[in-house]
Image (spheres, rainbow, N blue to C red):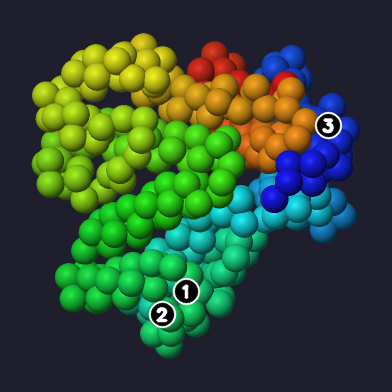
Amino acid sequence: MSNTKYTYAVARIRALEVSLFSDAFIEQLLACKSADQVLQSVMEKGWGDMGSGTDAEAVLKCEEEKAWAVIRDVAPDMSVFDVLSYPKLYHNLKAAVKEVSTGVKNPAMFYDDCPIPGEEMYRIIENREFSRLPGNMSRTAQEALDTLLHTGDGQLCDIIVDRAALDAIEEAGKKSGEPIIENYADTTVAIADIKIAVRSQKTGKSADFMRSAMAECESLSIDQLIRAALSGMEEIAQYLEGTSYAGGADALRESPSAFERWCDNRMIETLKSQKYETFSVGPLLGYLIARENEIKTVRIILTGKQNGFTDDAIRERIREMYV
């Protein structure tokens, strides 16, 4: 596809970027006295709609839907955004497998803003219509369902589905034909692998466990990461210092919340240069991730205010903005 086809889309995104939240506005939200004031402030910026009213979660969900609606409206090729839809798609698979296995339904567990909405995914799993699922997901669904039914091991089921999701993201990145999408996908998988290593080190998981949960990627070695995790948290930090994720080492040493914040900020930093592109999909991806990032940040502030956290405690968790 000729990159000139992105010219109109990028022009539209440029016009929308001016409404993205700045770090200064996030500080204003942080200064609000209550969660209600935070919600009122973002609604004054146009967040939510008549249907969402003043329900915080409904407002945030509305903004997620708006972000994707913009991309669907302007993107000449939606297939390159598969890497962003897979987390929700595979989450729906995991939720459907558990519901079918237990017989307990909870519609609130599903996402509807993805290629296979919750109810449809449930019917596919319930009727064992695995062939309706895309790519390797059909095999993953059958394996996860059989595993949960025969072992009752929910964690093992999660590992099967989560690992398949990471593999799908890495593969979609490579197939996209867009360097920025491939870079984003690889970074997504690498950060997920690092998080698995950190959690596994804290809980004393084995090398076999980590190897089953981690996905191969270009930007780091999972074998070296596993060896580091088996030796200690400092060894993970030392390994990261020799990779393109060196910033994660200092964050890891600082605190768990600092590390989580670094993971999200690393993705934003990866995409900031795309603001200056004109003939590629990069600005569209940057805008979408920026919107998801600001929604996540507002959710963190709302939750912090609702639970009486100090401003400093909330600030430690909030993410860097795209603009």
Q: Residue at x 61, y 21 (%)?
A: 320
Q: Quadrant of residue 90?
A: bottom left
Residue 240 image position (x, y, % from top left): 30, 19
Instruction: Identify which residue, 110 or 89, lies in the foreground.
Output: 89
Kind of residue at disc 1: Leu
Q: Which mark is residue 261?
A: none
Q: Which residue is mark 1?
A: 133
Mark 3 or mark 1: name the one nearer the start of the chain. Answer: 3
Q: Is residue 131 visible?
A: yes
Left or right for 112, reference 169: right
Q: Which mark is residue 14?
A: 3
Does dot 2 land on a helix, a strand or a loop?
Answer: helix
Q: Which residue is mark 2?
A: 130
Q: Quadrant of residue 323?
A: top right
Does dot 1 land on a helix, a strand or a loop?
Answer: loop
Q: CA distance from mark 3 to mark 1?
A: 36 Å
Q: Quadrant of residue 52?
A: bottom right
Q: Are marks 2 and 1 in contact (CB under 8 Å)?
A: yes
Residue 54 image position (x, y, % from top left): 78, 47
Q: Residue at x 29, y 59 (%)?
A: 160
Left or right for 117, reference 46: left
Does dot 3 land on a helix, a strand or a loop?
Answer: helix
Q: Residues within 10 Å of mark 1 (few under 14, many from 20)?
A: some
Q: Residues within 10 Å of mark 3 (few under 14, many from 20)?
A: some
Q: Residue at x 50, y 51 (%)?
A: 175
Kind of residue at disc 3: Arg
Kind of residue at disc 2: Phe
Q: CA distance from mark 2 to mark 1?
A: 6 Å
Mark 3 or mark 2: name the one nearer the start of the chain. Answer: 3
Residue 291 image position (x, y, % from top left): 69, 37
Q: Are marks 3 and 1 in contact (CB under 8 Å)?
A: no
Residue 82 image position (x, y, % from top left): 56, 54
